Amino acid sequence: MTSRIGVITFPGSLDDRDAQRAVRLVGAEPVALWHGDHDLHGVDAVVLPGGFSYGDYLRAGAIASHAPIMAEVIEAAERGVPVLGICNGFQMLAEARLLPGAHTRNAHQQFIRRDQKLRVENASTAWTNEFAEGDEIVIPLKNADGRFVADEQTIARIEGNGQVVFRYVDVNPNGSMNDIAGVSNERGNVVGLMPHPEHATEPGFGPDTRDAMRSGTDGLRFFTSALAALLSR
Amino acid sequence: MPIIVVEVMPKAEILDPQGKAVVGALHRLGKDKFSDVRIGKRFELTVEGLVDEEMLAEVREIAEDMLANTVIEDVVYVGEVR
């Protein structure tokens, strides 16, 4: 049976359609979900997409983290359903306390957009199992509030538990502590990262590679990983 | 109607780039006796009815749950505007 992956649209979401497209490209069925509903429509996995929900007012992701559908997302996350937060979605998952840490304004105060190299530090999560630990990938990054921060004990705990899933390589684009680009919960079913895998899923529209311009599709494996995780459950 | 004020500050160990930019500007103006500036937020909640201890307790809860992210911020003041 085709896996159904829900993508939640919040007021101010920008990359929901791109995430739906990425889901379709790996052969799953994208299901559009609405922030104001109390219904996940029985999906097998959930993506919280990028954007600027509620204009990033209060704090990035803060108001969206209290949206009606977040009650169901939290319940599903606790059941082990794969949940991926991309950029603004990562900020929402941190605000909802499904993921450790928080985000502040980039240390240099600028919005940044670049094709970002990352190292996969944990290849056993629901969203990274098709990678190998130590793989280096390039996917687009674009944000203003991407600086990952947490207190010392939390950093030590997540480093020790293998909850640091992605680290920035070559350049730390926003001042994130320990170069952390993405983290997971302890169970590994909930993953959040600032860069955008859904923008690197189709030749012609991804980052440049050594082979050809815009041919990078490193983001595909996030979604194939989720499918593999669903099949192995 | 009464107004309840909530003040939120970034935690001391969190880099505050806005404050850094302001202290840099002060120094460029020759105001170099100010060694640091940190910028926080002030919320004003207009309420119906009396501001009593129960109301303030509710606002403190809202402040900790939503107005501040206690991973990076502290609620430093909750009280009624006189």
Image: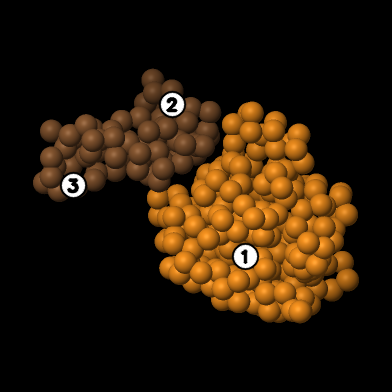
Q: Residue at x 70, y 31 (%)?
A: A156
Q: Which chain is orange?
A: A
Write down the quadrant of residue A229 in the picture: bottom right
Asked whether the beta carbons under mark 2 and mark 3 sit within 8 Å of each other, the answer is: no
Write down the quadrant of residue B50 in the picture: top left
With A116 as the anchor, is B80 left or right in this view? Answer: left
Q: Which residue is mark 1?
A: A47
Asked whether the beta carbons under mark 1 and mark 3 sit within 8 Å of each other, the answer is: no
Q: Which residue is mark 3?
A: B47
* Residue A50 locus on image (x, y percent): 57, 63
The answer to whether residue B7 is above or below residue A35 is above
- The crowd level at tag 3 (other Cα within 10 Å; few <14, some 14-19, many 20+) is few
Which mark, by number, is residue A18? none
**Amino acid identity at mark 1:** Val
Q: Which residue is mark 2?
A: B36
Of residues B60 and B72, which is closer to you in this image? B60
* Residue A148 locus on image (x, y percent): 61, 43
Q: Residue furthest top?
A: B33
The answer to whether residue A212 is above or below residue A74 is below
Q: Are marks 2 and 3 on the same chain?
A: yes
Q: Is residue A77 visible?
A: yes
Q: Residue at x 51, y 69 (%)?
A: A39
Of residues A168 and B2, which is closer to you in this image? B2
Q: What chain is tagged by disc 2?
A: B
Sequence order check: which comes first, mark 2 or mark 3? Answer: 2
Q: What chain is tagged by disc 1?
A: A
- The crowd level at tag 1 (other Cα within 10 Å; few <14, some 14-19, many 20+) is many
Alpha carbon of mark 2 to alpha carbon of mark 3: how far? 35 Å
